[in-house]
Amino acid sequence: MKKENIFDLRDVSKVYCMKGVETHALRNVNLTIAKGEYAAIIGPSGSGKSTLMHIMGCLDTPTSGKLILEGEDVSEMEDDELAHVRRERIGFVFQTYNLIPGLTAIENVSLPMRFNGIGKGEAQKRAIELLNKVGLSERMHHKPSEMSGGEQQRVAIARSLVNDPDIIMADEPTGNLDSKTGIEIMDLIEELHKNTGKTVIIVTHDKKLSKRAPRQIEMLDGKPVR
């Protein structure tokens, strides 16, 4: 039985204009990703892979074309509607972790839930559960400065799961880590995919890491070439 598409990009282009100069980051991209799929978007610097993730993650909008997310056209949504989509349906993991320095691991993971109207006790309980899941039961009350890069990225992964999104998007999730820790983070992402069935999309320039994904989408000059 064929799985339904969670993403359907139709002739998506993105053009940036700076000082009168146009840069075509994406050129008429047509791409589908099935619900529950694990895919890696790869390509050299400037190939359009991060722009593609930003469009799919509703962090940016296409200059032209359509982005269909689970059957709904999100390409022309207003900013507040896109923010709702990001908050409810997509979990992000970035290379730079994006943790708040003055907060502990529990507080960093709890924060998005508090913004979403969840009470402190319930948010803390969920944060503890997720930090246990990513192997940080002993580090919950530590601040980012007291944790290694790998531990900080585990906190970021736990935070990406707080609202139980359908989609996890990871942009160079191992970029700031040594090779051993990077492999551990990829193992964790793959385990979460296997255990939850969520759609997982990683962006990486590292071909060794990308080959771990069942599907590789290679970008070149703003278009997928395979």
Image (cartoon, rainbow, N blue to C red):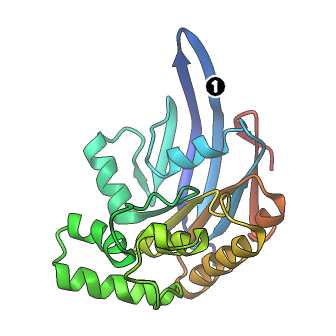
Counting labels gives: 1
Query: Please, is residue 27 above or below residue 150 in the view?
Result: above
162 up-or-down from 138: above or below: above
| 47 or 81: nearer the viewer | 47
Q: Position of residue 203 (x, y in %)?
A: 66, 55
Q: Using the rendered view, name the quadrant where residue 111 is placed.
A: bottom left
Dividing the picture into quarters, in which one does residue 96 lie?
bottom right
Mark 1 is surrounded, within 10 Å at the Cα level, by few (under 14), some (14 to 19) or many (20 or more) other residues, namely some
Residue at the image point whose x is 44% and y is 45% from the top: 59
194 and 125: which is toward the camera: 125
Q: Is residue 112 left or right of residue 205?
A: left
Q: Position of residue 68 (x, y in %)?
A: 47, 50
Q: Which residue is mark 1?
A: 24
- Horizontal relation, residue 190 to residue 205: left or right: left
Q: Is residue 7 above or below residue 80?
A: below
Q: Residue at x 64, y 61 (%)?
A: 202
Residue 147 shows in the view: yes
- The spot of residue 225 in percent (x, y) is 80, 44
Residue positioned 77% across, 46% down in the render: 43
Please state the horizontal and vertical placement of residue 77, each as a whole percent of the image: 33, 42
Q: Nearer the viewer, residue 111 or 26?
A: 111
Would residue 166 be visible to someone looking at this image? no
User: SS of the residue at dot 1?
Assistant: strand
Identity, as a three-letter code, of the amino acid under mark 1: His
Q: Is residue 127 above or below residue 171?
A: below
Task: Look at 46% across and 91% down and name the residue there.
Answer: 137
**Quadrant position of the N terminus in the picture:** bottom right
Residue that sits furthest to the front in the current view: 146
